[in-house]
Image (cartoon, grey):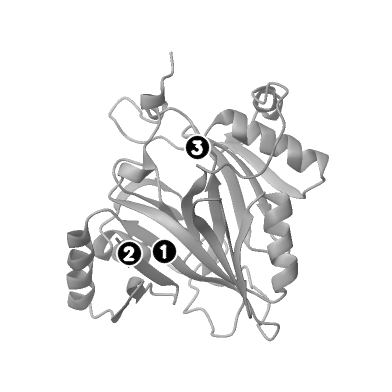
Amino acid sequence: MTTVTDFFDMHAAPMRIGKVQLKVRDLDAAASFYTSALGLVRLASSDGRVTLGTATAPLLELLGDPALAPNDRRQAGLFHTAFLMPTRADLARWLAHAVATRVPLQGASDHIVSEAIYLADPEGNGIEVYVDRPVSRWHGPAGEIRMSTDPLDAQALLKAADGTEWFGFPDDGMIGHVHLQVGDTAEADRFYSGVLGLDIAARYPGASFYGSGGYHHQLAGNIWNSRRAGRRPDGTGGLDTVEIVIRLAADIEAIAARAESAGIDISRDDDGLTLHDPWGTAITLRN
């Protein structure tokens, strides 16, 4: 029998995703998509900036600039931002909403650790909407995290809604992980595992999955579209910043020391500490 304790407590993890910042060419269209398709709430708006999230937490910040070059899927940057639903019924209700309102879906997968639906925003920024399976079902005989990409039984998932309706993104939903496009997985390992201190939880051909606290992944990096990509050009739409919430302040200082030893520049401000991965994506760490 599945109990609440079978599910991963993201807030107890040493590291978790806070909010994601995207640069978009059409701010109004992008913001409207995330509110209508995903049910996010508009929390704040200012000149060229919209913050979206739940009633209790910001999850996505959109920076608008019509002069941006279009997002290029061959470059390093975002593969997808993954929005984690609290329960399977929440995912089922959202899927029914997406089908009923004709949200363009791009795929659906059973990953053993999770059930996931894929789509993209109007500017091609990838999105995953998913729910975790119980932690007890994640591991193989040797205790390793097992992940796969198998067909999703969408009809079985839809039955989990049990006739209830979708009323927007749940207040206790969050960004569970961010999957990146990188130019080289070994270089990504050196940064995300060696410097940030995330565990390499699993590997696919051409991809590494980085977890904290035993989670299957809070971050991932693949070269499926972006093999040998260099630093992302300035003035391009797409991913700008990933915020990582660090549970212990001492861990931020340990990351800063490793970054300095690796010759990586860091900056500090009221929001925390910021450093850039080898492809120019800003990673902001806050407590």
Q: Nearer the viewer, residue 61 or 43?
A: 43
Local secondary structure at mark 1: strand
Looking at the image, is mark 3 or mark 2 earlier in the sequence?
Answer: 3
Q: Position of residue 116 (x, y in %)?
A: 59, 40
Identified by mark 1, the residue type is Glu
Say whether marks 3 and 2 touch (CB < 8 Å): no
**Going by the image, does 257 lie left or right of 281?**
left
* Residue pointed to by mark 3: 148
Identified by mark 2, the residue type is Arg
Among the 4 quarters of the image, the one containing residue 156: top right
Q: CA distance from mark 3 to mark 2?
A: 32 Å
Q: Position of residue 162 (x, y in %)?
A: 68, 21
* Residue pointed to by mark 2: 286
Q: Residue at x 32, y 34 (%)?
A: 144
* Residue pointed to by mark 1: 243
Q: Residue at x 68, y 51 (%)?
A: 119
